Amino acid sequence: MLLHVDDCGTMLGFCWTKVHRSPSSPIGEIYVLAVRPTHHGRGVGRSLAEAGLRSLRDRWIERAMLFVDAANTSALGLYERLGFTITCTATAFSASV
């Protein structure tokens, strides 16, 4: 897990990556990327995502994936700028229980 903190030690965001092992080749995942709302749009997310991808490359991972809410247009833009493309979409259901 990678953390981004300011000079006062306040956590501004984090990036959690993991590796999925498969018979053909492993694939990395940006599992969670979160940025403090007060710091959205300041490059924290991009910095964390780039560091996460570097950490995957350092482990010889050649491909990465992630899941993102389609309504999160800021995140969609960031991931597209980082070279990700949409390969599939999923539908989620919820209900009161």
Image (spheres, helix red, strand yellow):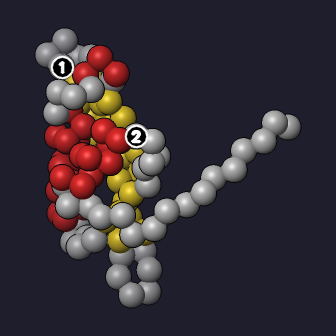
Image point (45%, 42%), residue name:
71
Q: Is residue 67 left or right of residue 82?
A: right
Q: Residues within 10 Å of mark 2 (few under 14, many from 20)?
A: few
Mark found first going from the N terminus, 2 or 1: 1
Viewer-nearest residue: 78 or 46: 78
Q: Is residue 41 visible?
A: yes
Query: Residue 10 appears at what percent x and percent y?
Result: 27, 17
Mark 1 falls on what kind of element? loop
Residue 25: mark in rendering: none
24 versus 70 height, above or below: below
Query: Residue 35 appears at what percent x and percent y?
Result: 32, 30
34 versus 8 height, above or below: below
- Marks 2 and 1: which is nearer the front? 2
Quadrant containing the C terminus in the rendered view? top right
Viewer-nearest residue: 10 or 75: 75
Image point (20%, 32%), residue name:
44
Query: Residue 73 appears at what percent x and percent y?
Result: 35, 41
Q: Residues within 10 Å of mark 1 (few under 14, many from 20)?
A: few
The residue lying furthest to the top in this view is 8
Q: Is residue 55 left or right of residue 73?
A: left
The residue lying furthest to the right in this view is 97
| Disc 2/disc 1 C-alpha distance (Å) | 25 Å
Tags 2 and 1 touching, CB below 8 Å = no
**Res 80 quadrant in image:** bottom left
Quadrant containing the N terminus in the rendered view? top left
Image point (21%, 28%), residue name:
41
Mark count: 2
> Label 1: which residue?
6
Residue 72: mark in rendering: 2
Q: Amino acid at mark 1?
A: Asp
Query: Residue 76 appears at what percent x and percent y?
Result: 32, 48
Q: Amino acid at mark 2?
A: Asn
